[in-house]
Amino acid sequence: MSDAVLRHRALEALTTARARTVLLTTCVDDDELTTQHSPLMSPLVWDLAHIGNQEEQWLLRAVAGREAIRPEIDSVYDAFEHPRAERPSLPLLSPAESRTYASDVRGRVLDVLDRHPLHGGPLVDAGFAFGMIAQHEQQHDETMLITHQLRRGPAALDAPEPPRGSTVGLPAEVLVPEGPFTMGTSTEPWALDNERPAHHRHLPAYFIDATPVTNAAYQAFIADGGYTDERWWAPDGWDQIRRHGIGAPLFWRREGGQWLRRRFGVTEPVPEDEPVLHVSWYEADAYARWAGRRLPTEAEWEKAARHDPVSGRSRRYPWGDEDPAPDRANLGQRHLRPAPAGAYPQGASPLGVRQLIGDVWEWTSSDFLPYPGFAAFPYREYSEVFFGPEHKVLRGGSFAVDPVACRGTFRNWDLPVRRQIFSGFRTARDV
Ligand code: AVJ
Ligand code: FE
């Protein structure tokens, strides 16, 4: 890719992210930016200034060698020094100061992007640091959208409905034959450290669901007493649902014989044909066991999403190597919900698996672990410090993920108890 194209892509990615950040931090009153809507989340104003601070640290200081603009705030916006629950009590910049700071940083960054060479080291090659920072901002935008979902009060966001979809004529599951495939990447320019390097895996044959598990299917699990039958549950999951009295996905409630859910300030009947959302890994795991199935491993998910059985090579996305477009996948907060199962025929994989990219993050059975040959870059706190059995991998991205932070190799992770995230799942089985 030419230097001009790389600069243009970086500019576009940063600009798209900022427009979304501005939307998410101006659609409610400033006093709502400083309150904590849930102990699981930061006040929105923390995310806003943290976005600016990371951008300053990486693009102004690390790339361009500039002096700190406000060195005294680094520690306030260090995610490792302060867990989310304690962030409201920090000496945070006000909403107005946070906006000024973030746009001041951005103004200087655009200058750097105009002039700085995009070669000469891994941080700047192909504009990596700019792409990394655009992804970082988009990841926090998704986090802020989660905060919006948790927030009480009337709707502050609006979006058109996603396209329709139907599973009529689709098989329930697809056979992925035994064989090798290439997992991860060594060539995707803005891939993050945990997606690297490319390496071979050989998988036995397996079946994987053609679409994510729907609310209708999940309701059958509930109606069959799934939440009261210990047989289906991992021990820690059983503990969690008993301790917290959990009997349905987060934001659901039962009223007058039907399931309702709260979605961005509106209460509505749970749509039967939509992928289930806001379930923990434990809930996904229990459902799969009840259904006589299991969660796919991370490698099974990626092979289903990337392996081209004709050429034998791995694609960037299920549909090929072209960047996501609106007819391929539900991404970028264009809609405020997943599309119905069976939507996006143009996004299908070669074997006919749908909605691997977008709609809902998909829990896998796998722990978040480094690939063989992993090297932390550019900082250990992005992924390396999270490796281990306590985090489970999610794949594919939700409707709240921007295309810049979503690809067939992208890896997300969280604790198995988490359900405020935009998480769903699909199931698999051995042959
Ligand atoms: C990759 C989504 C787990 O939000 O904790 C943001 C992304 N890392 N700032 C997170 C991230 C640093 C991260 N996840
Ligand atoms: Fe961050």
Image (tube, grey):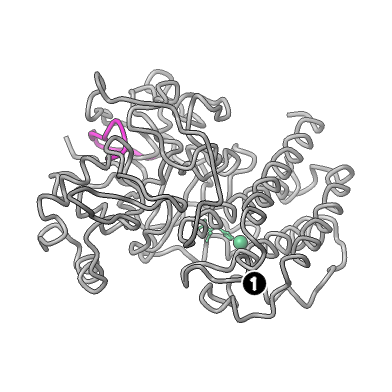
Which segment did they paint magenta?
201-213
Residue 209: where, in percent of width, then height? 26, 34
Percent position of residue 84, x then y: 53, 72
Structural crowding at the residue carrying mark 1, measured as other residues with C-alpha within 10 Å and reported as few (<14), some (14–19) or many (≥20) = few
Looking at the rendering, the quadrant in which ligand 2 lies is bottom right
342 sits to left or right of 52:
left
The one of 236 and 47 positioned closer to us in this rendering = 47
- Residue at left 47%, top 62%? 152
The residue identified by callout 1 is: 78
Query: On the image, which quarter does residue 248 sit in?
Result: bottom left
The residue positioned 64% from the left and 80% from the top of the image is: 90
Kind of residue at badge 1: Asp
- Horizontally, residue 124 falls left or right of residue 232, namely right
Is residue 425 visible from the viewing direction of this image? no
Residue drawn at point x = 10 percent, y = 60 percent: 229
Snapshot quadrant of residue 230: bottom left
In percent of the image, x 26 and y 35: which residue is there?
208
The question of residue 316 being in magenta is answered with no
Q: Is residue 409 visible?
A: yes
Mark 1 lies on a secondary structure that is loop
Looking at the picture, how far across and down is residue 235, in whole percent? 19, 68
The mark tally for this picture is 1
Task: Say left or right for 259 vs 380.
Answer: left
